[in-house]
């Protein structure tokens, strides 16, 4: 967009990002011809063109900046995205409602004693690496709560991520503003009837991998994987706010509520 812009426009500097698919690249070319483009570092808002995978990558990329992210679906799932329309983008951005997400922090020590840290917007997952089930003990705020879990894995999710892998593992769907974190086993063998727990979102979850050499486990924070872990700590980072923008009537709260009723 060239020339003076109306005073009601909320975001004057827009950066567009494509997932790289032909559909997303076509949308990128069309939108930049209509609205111009800005380098992401100088933008007031970032418009992500793709699916939920691109949205997660974009949120991770701009996590330190607090830039609002507005997604338009040019992918397959698009649960986190808005519908794609090229026209009226300035109006849509001005009317969009923010959803605030706090990421999880994962701290890991592997079997060699090396340490690493990563963030997760959806979930932190612990997954068996071999044909044998994993064995884990679980502590919450320094107190052991489950001495031995034998399972394919275990995950801790954010409310926003409760509709992703957590839901596929039969975990509960949470409202976006729920002060809770689902702790969900993946194909639990023992205790056979343990279906997980709902923890306060201020809790620190500590997981010790038992028989780590014989039963190797990988820890995954969204798409960041560390193999052969021995000890994992997970907690929510309340100091970091991620801002997603959605059209009125299609907020993340509304989408999560629809998932709870199966539509």
Image (cartoon, grey):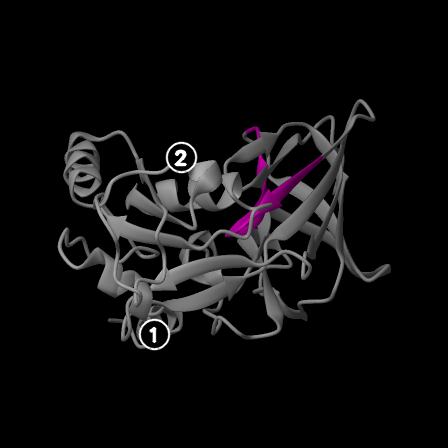
On the image, the x and y values in percent for residue 156 come to: 60, 55
- As drawn, which residue projects farthest toward the front? 4
Which quarter of the rendered picture does the C terminus lie within? bottom left
Gap in angstroms between the C-alphas marked 2 and 1 = 32 Å
Closer to the chain start, of discs 2 and 1, is 2
Look at the picture and state if 167 lies above or below 97.
above
Identify the image quadrant of residue 210.
top right
Look at the picture and state if 174 lies above or below 137.
below
Magenta includes 126? yes
Look at the picture and state if 121 lies above or below 58.
below
Residue under label 1:
254
> What's the magenta bit mostly, secondary-structure-wise?
strand
Residue at x 30% of width, y 70% of height: 95
On the image, the x and y values in percent for residue 172 come to: 48, 68
- As drawn, which residue projects farthest toward the right? 142
Magenta includes 74? no
74 lies left or right of 205? left
Towards the viewer: 215 or 75? 75
- Label 1 element class: helix
Residue at x 67% of width, y 31% of height: 215
Circle number at residue 127: none
Towards the viewer: 145 or 47? 47
Identify the image quadrant of residue 192.
bottom right
172 lies left or right of 31? right
On the image, the x and y values in percent for residue 36 come to: 25, 40
Residue at x 67% of width, y 62% of height: 238
Magenta region = 117-130
Identify the image quadrant of residue 33.
top left
Residue under label 2:
39
- Label 2 element class: loop
Towards the viewer: 202 or 148? 202
On the image, the x and y values in percent for residue 155 come to: 58, 52
């Amino acid at each position: 967009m060239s020339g003076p812009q109306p005073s009601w426009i909320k975001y004057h500097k827009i950066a567009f990002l494509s997932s790289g698919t032909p559909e997303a690249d076509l949308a990128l070319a069309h939108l930049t011809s209509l609205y111009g483009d800005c380098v992401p570092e100088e933008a007031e808002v970032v418009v992500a063109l793709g699916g939920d995978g691109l949205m997660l990558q974009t949120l991770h990329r701009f996590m330190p900046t607090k830039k609002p992210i507005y997604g338009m679906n040019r992918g397959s799932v698009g649960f986190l995205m808005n519908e794609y329309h090229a026209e009226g983008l300035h109006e849509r951005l001005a009317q969009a409602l923010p959803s605030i997400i706090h990421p999880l922090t994962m701290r890991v020590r592997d079997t060699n004693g090396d340490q690493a840290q990563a963030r997760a917007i959806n979930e932190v997952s612990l997954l068996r690496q071999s044909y044998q089930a994993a064995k884990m003990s679980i502590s919450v705020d320094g107190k052991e709560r489950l001495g031995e879990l034998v399972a394919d894995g275990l995950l801790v999710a954010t409310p926003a991520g409760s509709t992703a892998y957590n839901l596929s593992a039969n975990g509960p769907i949470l409202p976006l503003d729920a002060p809770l974190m689902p702790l969900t086993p993946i194909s639990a063998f023992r205790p056979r009837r343990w279906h997980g727990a709902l923890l306060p979102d201020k809790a620190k979850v500590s997981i010790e991998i038992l028989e780590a050499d014989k039963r190797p486990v990988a820890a995954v924070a969204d798409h960041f994987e560390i193999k052969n872990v021995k000890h994992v700590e997970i907690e929510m980072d309340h100091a970091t706010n991620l801002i997603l923008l959605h059209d009125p009537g299609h907020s993340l709260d509304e989408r999560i509520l629809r998932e709870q009723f199966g539509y």
